[in-house]
Every structure is written in structure tokens, then in C-alpha cells.
Image (cartoon, rainbow, N blue to C red):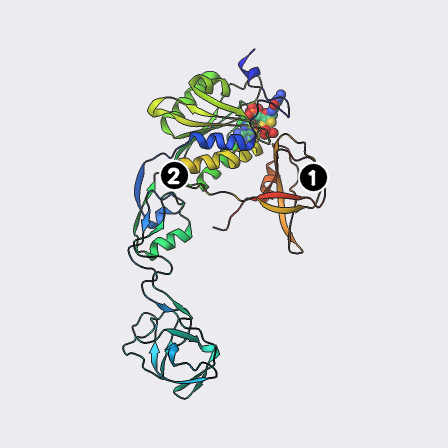
């Protein structure tokens, strides 16, 4: 039997295919972070992963301060039932310490963020009070300590504010800035090399010959890797011959932590990729019970110091993206040091159409989720062929039809994965 025949994945219910969950946990079990760290200026840390804990060097907020515009007073001065009349003796502004102290029967106008003057313990918001010349009338029902943010309430001095492994998003940048961090220690960028295989592929910038298609996979892969913050190395289109492919694999392995290929992993005459992967390294699995993205090789290529992780993605343009988002993304996060790797939540939505689905594989349909009468509803975004990039572009989510699920009827609850997050 030829190698390509042994790597076949002909039947929809292939007993050799791993389930999506098995493939995910197997990949996860193989990987550890790349390990090398570097210090970068705070802004350059966006999208990177923290390599060491960030310990708060002081309390945040550093001092008690008012959460509202209003009046700072001594709670003990307030009558237990009915109104209280206090004399206003000055104003406390944010960024300026109020010089005096507040005695019995007195209060101070206070702005949000200002330190409560000595003697005060409570702030009453200005909307609740009446001003009568230099006096203030306060209604009953004020709680001791209300509207005062306490020192250390956000972050306590000496405690970890962020743990190593945290992916740095805008909130983390702001948090570290609030601690005065000008530089942070992050994992080095992951180096990912990729190339496309196939004699029918034409790189953009050249006219198409008969039977050729433009290579779009290198652009989707470039986009997905760049968004993940990887250092990308585009090795172009490699012809379907063993020598060129072997040279490309060696170049990629020498330069990168991860090698991604697209095409040539199925059973066609010219599908040399998998056998070569097996020759140059170790293919750990190559079939997943999913659609699209069924043939996907995962393994290690090269040896010793110069070994790289390998993802041999299928050629079909949507299969590339589905396999990347379902497996490669998480794997790259682990290699980048992210712990836990940021998960993409599965959210419930009501299907507005019937969908054909056979049990025995997980399907990732491209969908459009929208709010109808306060409820999330989803429908497929046009043609679901593995080569139809247009519906991938029009979709805003994957509709995830689980392994054991059969047909979907109108009104059934399904799970969706949104393409875009907020931050
Ligand atoms: N007899 C069988 N045929 C196929 C099977 C199967 O099990 N038995 N599986 C199908 C599935 S599912 C997929 S996915 C593809 C994967 O095959 P390959 O990884 O070998 O991909 P190719 O044959 O090279 O290409 C498939 C398709 O995608 C186009 N393509 C490839 N690379 C690019 C690129 N960089 N940019 C744009 N388009 C690309 C290529 O022209 C083909 O049309 O195999 C099925 N067949
Ligand atoms: O796995 Mo293929 O991706 O169904 O097109």
C-alpha cells in the first residue's frame, strides 16, 4: 500500500480520526512554552504574554478617595432619623490635599477622586442634599463609609496584580501603567514559518494561467498569525515535488518554532506533504472527525535544538481557517506562554433554519448571529463548501455542531463561537 493510501481519510465516519476534543487535548499535552523572555517597553507589550508576575509596589488606589461629587462629613454627626444641618467649611479637590480638619457639625464639599479631609468618613452625593447659604441639609438614611473608595481596594501592595502567563490586552496595559511599570518581562515572540503547496497556485502580482488559482491561504494564515502577535516568515508557494518540499521544510525548521503548511495532506496523486513530514520528523496524527478541516497533520519536524512543531493544514481555504482557529490558535498561545490560553466561549443561539448534520463528526458552519426580539438567533452565512471564502468573510461566527448531534430543526438551540471579541 502506498503512503498516500495509508494516510487516506475517505469515509465520513473514519474510525482512525480523532474527535475534535481528543485532538485538542492531545496537542495540548505535547506542548510547553518556548521559554525565552525579554523586557519590553509597556506599549510594546500589547498582545504579548507576561513572563513573570507583576507585584503591586503600592496600594491602588494609594489613598482613600471619594467615589462621587458631594460632601464629606462625619457619620457620627448625622441624626438617626430626620435631617441634619452641617456647616460647609471648604472644598476638597482631586489632586490637592485639604489642609484643615473637619470638626463636629462641619462638612466639606468634595470632588470625585479627592482625599476625604481628616475627620470625615462618609460622602453624601450632591444630588441628595439642599444648600442653605454656607449650610447643608442632609436627609436621613446615609450609610457610614458610603461613596469612599478605600486604599488598596483595587490592588493591595505586595500582592500579585497580574500573574505570569497573562495575555496583555488594553486593560492589562492600563493596570500596569497604574502601578508605574515602564517595562515588563514578556515571552519572546513566536516565530512561525509557513508555505503553500500545489502546482496550481499562483502568487498574487502575476497573471493567472489556465488551471491556476491565486494563493489565498498564505494571506489568511498571515492575517491570523499577525493578529496573534507572531513573527511571521512567509516562504511562498512550494511546488509539488519532493525535493522542493524537502528544502522548504528544512528552511522553515531552521528558522522557526512552528511550521505551517497548507495543501497536500489529502490522498491526491501529488500529496507529498505528509510522507515527507513523516520522513523529516514525526507525524503524531493527521485525521480529525470534523468538517471542514478533516485532514490535518500535527507533529514535530527536524531534531534536537532545531526541531519545530508542525501543522499540515488542508488546502481548502475555509478548512485552513477552521483548522487554524480550532487547533493552531490554542497551540500557539500555549507556546507563547499564555496560561490559561484565552478560550473562545461557546454561546447558545436559536437556529433560524434547519441544518443537515450527521452524527460522528464536529461541523463548523459559517454563521451570522444576530439579536432578534432580545434573543441570539443564527443562520448559515451562505455556501458551506470548504473552498467558499466569501461565506467565511460574511460570517460573524462559527456554528459549532457537536460530534454526536444529528439534524438541526428550526428553533433548536445550537452553540456559536464569535469571530471577534471586544478587546
Ligand atoms: N478522495 C478524497 N479527496 C479528498 C478528500 C478525501 O478524503 N478523499 N478530502 C477532501 C478534503 S476534506 C480536503 S480539506 C482536501 C484537502 O486536500 P489537500 O490538503 O491535499 O489540499 P489540495 O488538494 O492541495 O487542495 C484542495 C483545494 O484547495 C485549493 N488550495 C490549495 N491550496 C490553496 C491556496 N494556498 N490558496 C487557495 N486555494 C488553495 C486547491 O486548489 C484545491 O481546490 O481534499 C479533499 N479531497
Ligand atoms: O476537511 Mo475538508 O476541509 O472538509 O474541506
Residue 251, image x and y in percent? Answer: 39, 24
Answer few, some or many: residues within 10 Å of disc 2's Cα (few below 14, many 20 plus, some between 14 and 19): many
What residue is at 37 percent from the left and 21 percent from the top? 303
Answer few, some or many: residues within 10 Å of disc 1's Cα (few below 14, many 20 plus, some between 14 and 19): some
What residue is at 46 percent from the left and 81 percent from the top? 129
Q: Which mark is residue 408?
A: 1
SS at mark 2? loop
| Residue placed under numbered mark 2 in the picture | 337
Residue 28 vs residue 377: left or right? left
Quadrant of the image containing the N terminus: top right
Q: Residue furthest bottom?
A: 133
Inter-mark Cα distance, 2 to 1: 38 Å
Residue 409 vs residue 264: left or right? right
Q: In which of the image's four quarters is ligand 2 placed? A: top right
Distance from mark 1 CB to nearest ligand 2 atom below 8 Å: no
User: Is residue 326 among what the camera can see?
Assistant: yes
- Which residue is more in the foreground, 33 or 44? 33
Location of residue 97 (image quadrant): bottom left
Residue 328, image x and y in percent? Answer: 48, 34
Residue 38, image x and y in percent? Answer: 30, 41
First in sequence: mark 2 or mark 1?
A: 2
- Which residue is more in the foreground, 2 or 385? 2
- Which residue is more in the foreground, 107 or 184? 107
Residue 378 to residue 289: above or below = below
Amino acid at each position: 500500500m502506498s503512503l498516500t493510501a495509508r494516510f487516506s481519510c475517505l469515509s465520513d465516519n473514519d474510525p482512525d480520526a480523532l474527535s475534535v476534543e481528543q485532538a485538542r487535548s492531545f496537542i495540548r499535552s505535547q506542548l510547553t512554552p518556548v521559554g525565552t523572555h525579554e523586557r519590553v517597553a509597556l506599549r510594546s507589550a500589547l498582545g504579548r504574554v507576561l513572563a513573570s508576575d507583576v507585584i503591586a509596589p503600592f496600594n491602588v488606589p494609594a489613598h482613600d478617595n471619594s467615589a462621587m461629587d458631594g460632601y464629606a462629613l462625619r457619620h457620627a454627626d448625622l441624626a438617626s432619623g430626620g435631617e441634619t444641618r452641617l456647616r460647609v467649611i471648604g472644598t476638597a479637590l482631586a489632586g490637592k490635599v485639604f489642609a484643615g480638619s473637619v470638626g463636629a457639625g462641619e462638612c466639606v464639599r468634595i470632588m470625585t477622586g479627592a482625599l476625604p479631609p481628616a475627620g470625615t468618613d462618609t460622602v453624601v452625593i450632591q444630588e441628595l442634599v439642599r444648600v442653605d447659604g454656607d449650610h447643608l441639609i442632609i436627609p436621613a438614611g446615609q450609610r457610614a463609609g458610603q461613596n469612599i473608595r478605600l486604599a488598596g481596594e483595587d490592588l493591595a501592595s505586595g500582592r500579585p496584580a497580574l500573574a505570569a502567563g497573562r495575555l496583555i490586552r488594553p486593560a492589562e496595559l492600563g493596570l500596569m501603567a497604574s502601578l508605574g511599570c515602564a517595562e515588563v518581562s514578556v515571552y519572546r515572540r513566536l516565530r512561525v514559518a509557513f508555505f503553500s503547496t500545489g502546482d496550481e497556485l499562483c502568487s498574487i502580482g502575476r497573471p493567472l494561467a489556465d488551471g491556476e488559482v491565486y494563493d489565498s491561504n498564505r494571506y489568511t494564515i498571515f492575517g491570523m498569525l499577525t493578529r496573534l502577535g507572531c513573527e511571521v516568515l512567509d516562504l511562498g508557494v512550494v511546488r509539488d515535488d519532493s525535493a522542493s518540499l524537502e528544502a522548504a521544510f528544512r528552511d522553515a525548521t531552521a528558522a522557526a518554532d512552528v511550521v505551517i503548511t497548507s495543501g497536500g495532506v489529502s490522498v491526491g496523486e501529488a500529496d507529498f506533504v505528509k510522507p515527507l513530514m513523516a520522513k523529516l520528523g514525526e507525524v503524531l496524527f493527521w485525521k480529525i472527525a470534523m468538517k471542514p478541516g478533516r485532514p490535518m497533520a500535527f507533529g514535530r519536524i527536524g531534531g534536537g535544538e532545531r526541531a519545530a512543531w508542525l501543522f499540515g493544514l488542508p488546502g481548502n481555504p475555509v478548512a485552513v481557517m477552521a483548522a487554524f482557529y480550532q487547533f493552531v490558535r490554542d497551540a500557539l498561545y500555549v507556546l507563547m506562554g499564555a496560561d490559561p490560553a484565552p478560550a473562545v466561549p461557546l454561546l447558545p443561539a436559536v437556529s433560524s433554519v434547519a441544518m443537515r448534520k450527521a452524527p460522528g463528526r464536529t461541523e463548523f458552519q459559517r454563521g451570522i448571529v444576530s439579536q432578534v426580539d432580545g434573543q441570539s438567533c443564527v443562520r448559515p452565512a451562505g455556501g458551506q463548501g470548504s473552498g467558499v471564502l466569501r461565506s467565511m468573510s460574511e460570517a460573524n461566527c462559527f456554528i459549532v455542531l457537536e460530534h454526536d448531534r444529528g439534524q438541526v430543526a428550526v428553533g433548536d438551540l445550537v452553540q456559536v463561537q464569535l469571530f471577534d471579541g471586544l478587546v
